[in-house]
Image (cartoon, rainbow, N blue to C red):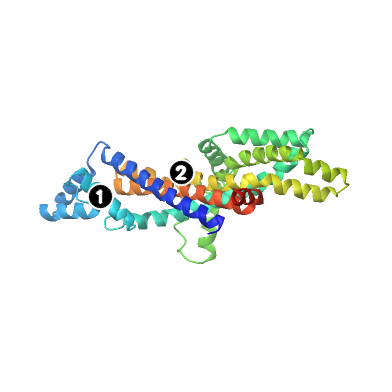
């Protein structure tokens, strides 16, 4: 069995256990939240003219387990359904499985998060290299200051500033929503253009909020690599500066690839604030809505999906670092 296969098997086993633990904690927290959404749903069905027996059965079907059973029975039913990818049915969307609701919302979170993170990563690492090489000059100082300022501003503050600037003072971009309802959904210029236009501010918020961290991390990594023996030896041998520059960048960027994978997972949770401000129908917005509506099945599913995304990002980060860094592979194989 290869090194990558062994590490993957170990990570998958630990990831499964962690997801199971999170699902367990989520189940018991949700079941201890004040209020009884099942009773509220039952009363609403009665008000709509449904017979008591039929209303009780409908409530049981909606929640995916027997609410009148013991807590252990409810938990067993919940875990059994989870293993079969059955997270129950949304109360606010009668008859619609929670998994379908989450899948539909995930695309609105993943695409802006991915675009914003990759954009900030590319710009951050390029400017981070220059900030390190020019660290004694005005350019290096300016780049470092810009990174420090943006790194210190919370995401929701950046989002509100962008709304004020580009939707109020200079009204060139929409402040909320994911698409203009005037356009018919489909592969047409109007609809796609509206999607892009509404995504600009969320993507820009993700990019600006992450840019500061990337440029500072890359600068620190480059400064560390500049002091390595192989760089000094290359300069003494008269190697071209462009080749030395490539060596510096390639070695300094290795730790940042791990951070990139981790940040993608963590941003799924951080999207709550941004999506709420821009009224963007992603996982964060869905989680807040489920709390407000007391849709406990949807709340637990959203929380579990966000957590699973973070765990998977950790696994990908570790495996990716093993693949791209030969020092890690050789060290593991030697042991």
Q: Nearer the viewer, residue 2 or 221?
A: 2
Q: Label 2 neighbourhood size at 10 Å, few (<14), some (14-19), many (20+)?
A: many
How crowded is the residue under tag 1: few (<14 C-alpha within 10 Å), some, or many (20+)? Answer: few
Query: Residue 308 at what x, y percent from top left?
Result: 43, 49
Instruction: Decide if residue 194 is on the left or right side of residue 237.
Output: left
Where is residue 59? Give x, y as percent: 20, 52
At which x and y percent is residue 97? 31, 57
Q: Is residue 75 visible?
A: yes
Q: Nearer the viewer, mark 1 or mark 2?
A: 1
Q: Give the alpha-carbon distance from disc 1 to disc 2, as whole Å.
A: 27 Å
Lower sequence index among marks 1 and 2: 1
Q: Which mark is residue 269?
A: 2
Q: Residue at x 40, y 45 (%)?
A: 18
Residue found 38% across the figure and 45% down from its top: 303
Using the image, tell me which numbered label, if any, was put on residue 76.
1
Q: Secondary structure at mark 2?
A: helix
């Amino acid at each position: 069995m290869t090194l990558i296969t062994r590490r993957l098997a170990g990570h998958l086993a630990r990831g499964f256990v962690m997801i199971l633990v999170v699902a367990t904690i989520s189940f018991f927290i949700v079941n201890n939240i004040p209020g009884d959404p099942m009773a509220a749903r039952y009363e609403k069905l009665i008000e709509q003219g449904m017979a008591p027996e039929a209303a009780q059965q409908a409530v049981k079907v909606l929640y995916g387990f027997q609410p009148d059973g013991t807590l252990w029975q409810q938990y067993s039913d919940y875990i059994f359904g989870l293993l079969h990818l059955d997270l129950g049915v949304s109360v606010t969307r009668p008859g619609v499985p929670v998994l379908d609701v989450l899948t539909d919302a995930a695309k609105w979170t993943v695409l802006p998060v991915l675009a914003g993170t990759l954009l900030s990563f590319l710009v951050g690492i390029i400017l981070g290299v220059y900030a390190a090489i020019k660290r004694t000059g005005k350019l290096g100082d300016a780049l470092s200051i810009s990174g420090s300022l943006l790194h210190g501003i919370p995401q929701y503050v950046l989002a509100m500033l962008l709304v004020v600037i580009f939707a109020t003072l200079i009204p060139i971009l929409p402040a909320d929503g994911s698409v203009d309802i005037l356009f018919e959904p489909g592969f047409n210029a109007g609809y796609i253009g509206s999607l892009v236009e509404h995504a600009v501010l969320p993507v820009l918020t993700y990019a600006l909020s992450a840019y500061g961290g990337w440029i500072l991390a890359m600068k620190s990594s480059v400064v560390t690599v500049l002091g390595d023996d192989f760089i000094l030896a290359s300069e003494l041998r008269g190697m071209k500066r462009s080749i030395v520059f490539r060596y510096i960048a390639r070695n300094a960027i290795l730790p940042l690839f791990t951070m990139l994978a981790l940040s993608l997972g963590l941003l799924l949770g951080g999207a709550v604030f941004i999506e709420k401000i821009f009224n963007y129908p992603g996982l964060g917005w869905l989680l807040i809505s489920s709390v407000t509506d007391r849709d406990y099945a949807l709340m637990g599913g959203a929380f579990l999906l966000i957590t699973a995304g973070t765990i998977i990002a950790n696994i990908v980060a570790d495996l990716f670092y093993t693949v791209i860094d030969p020092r890690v592979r050789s060290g593991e194989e030697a042991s």
